[in-house]
Image (spheres, helix red, strand yellow):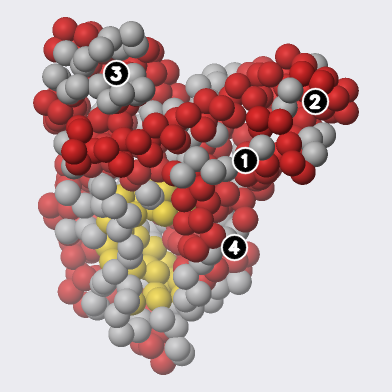
Amino acid sequence: MFEKITDKIAGSFKKLRGNNIISSENINNSLKEIRMSLLEADVNYKVVKSLIDAVEERAIGQEVVKSVSPSEQFIKIFNDELIKLLGEKTEPLNIKVSPPAVIMMTGLQGSGKTTTAAKLAKYLKEKEKRNPCLVSVDIYRPAAIEQLKILSDQIKIPFIQSDSKNVLEICEKAYEHAYNNGFDTLIIDTAGRLQIDSDMIDELKSIKTKITVHETMLVIDSMIGQEAINVAKEFNDQIEIEGILLTKLDGDARGGAALSAKFITGKPIKFYGFGEKLDMLDIFHPDRMASRILGMGDVVSLVEKASGAIDEESANKLSEKFKKNEFDFNDFKDAIKSMNKIGSLKSTLSMIPGMGNLSNDEEALKRASIELRRTVAIIDSMTKKEKSDHALLDGSRRRRIAKGSGTSVQDINSLVKKFLQMKKMSKNMGKFKKNSKNMLNFN
């Protein structure tokens, strides 16, 4: 979704190369271009102003760290401020309460509430080891209740059926059912409208009055443009939400308005959906999303999605390997191969450093698919030692690998170049963090 933003920001960064200091003169054009790219992507103008002002204030006059270019330093500053904009830290659901914890899914009709309710239930069951159940109070849309029931059957999570046409009665009985049958989480799929109206708001308020709702989640379609800002603000003002869940983040829309929701409401983005399959829901990590928007990839999330069962300790170990510049071709191959397990190539390209700027046309995706298969074949043709130490890859070894993988020496050279660029980025980011307090005052 953020390819155009990524391309324009990357182009702006390049203009800073070759300078010994970041000054108002050499960042002015870059900031202007970035400002326009964000506005064109439907990022709210107040959000853009806040971000650009913060970056400009920190960047102008900063001395460049030895061996680190101004463009790389500027990327670090921009990355820090973008993370702040997106929320700084991951915010968990407020469900560590006496059971059953109640999650109420709200949003406009067509935002994906019903499918997302099922996705969230599946996520909580498989990733959080909770025991959820689902209920629908959308008595106005004929197929809504049946849709959630079908989805519940698919993910093997209990659905609470009711013949009542009274929303409050359905909620009250569903809560009692969850409590009496040992369910620790009750997810309520509420009715939406094509636009916000008083009847919908009154109904949501009544539900929160009738039963204790621990987490009111606002589901926002990332493709609705600037209207996302109005929707988020109105829902938060009227019923007070606890978190935001973005859907269709894999779409072709500009998406900036959805990311503005955190700034406008002050409420965190907690999850995002990136495809139609019921396992395509993930925690929103501000730092990882910022990295993807800036074209630096997100290999940790890629591996997490691919494994399906990777624990936090394993994810942290992988993250540390990248921070310490210790990853090798084995890690590189694992990250690439994992793409086949997490959905479409289009939705995951931005997670691989250097590949996030591919266009959306079919020919480009075909070329990317071929490139990924070629990369895996090249790494498979390396010896165990070569995979662990790229420095061993001299001319004769590269010729042998090219012959064994059915590729050319130029292909090997290109792969090594991309690999070294990724290591350099990780190394420089590590330098930034190490020297931030004394040299750059980044914190």
Mark 1 touches mark 4? (CB < 8 Å): no
Among the two numbered marks 1 and 3 on one chain, the one whose residue lies closer to the N terminus: 3
Residue farthest toward the bottom in the current orientation of the protein: 180
Q: Mark 1 packing: few (<14 Cα in 10 Å), some, or many (20+)?
A: some
Q: Please name the residue shown 29% across and 80% down the image.
A: 97
Name the amino acid type tagged 4. Ala
From the viewer's perspective, tell me whether residue 184 is left or right of residue 406. left
Q: Which amino acid does label 3 sit on?
A: Pro
Residue 228, percent across and down?
Answer: 27, 38
Which image quarter is the C terminus in? top left
Residue count near mark 3 (Cα–Cα under 10 Å), binned few <14, some 14–19, many ≥20: many
Q: What residue type is labelled 1?
A: Asp
From mark 4 to mark 2, how far is it between C-alphas?
36 Å
Which one is nearer the viewer's eye here, 246 or 320? 320
Which of labels 4 and 3 is toward the front?
3
Q: In which quarter of the image is the N terminus?
A: top left
Q: Which residue is the site of mark 2? A: 397
Q: Is mark 3 on a helix, strand or loop?
A: helix
The residue identified by callout 3 is 70
Q: Mark 4 points at which residue?
A: 309
Q: Do the residues labelled 2 and 3 touch (CB within 8 Å)?
A: no
Where residue 434 sits in the image (x, y, percent)?
30, 42
Are circles 4 and 2 on residues that touch, CB within 8 Å?
no
Q: Distance between the residues labelled 4 and 3?
A: 40 Å
**Which quarter of the figure has residue 364?**
top right
Which residue lies at the image location 14% right of the left edge and 55% below the top edge?
Answer: 238
Say what secondary structure mark 2 lies in: helix
Q: Mark 1 points at which residue?
A: 328
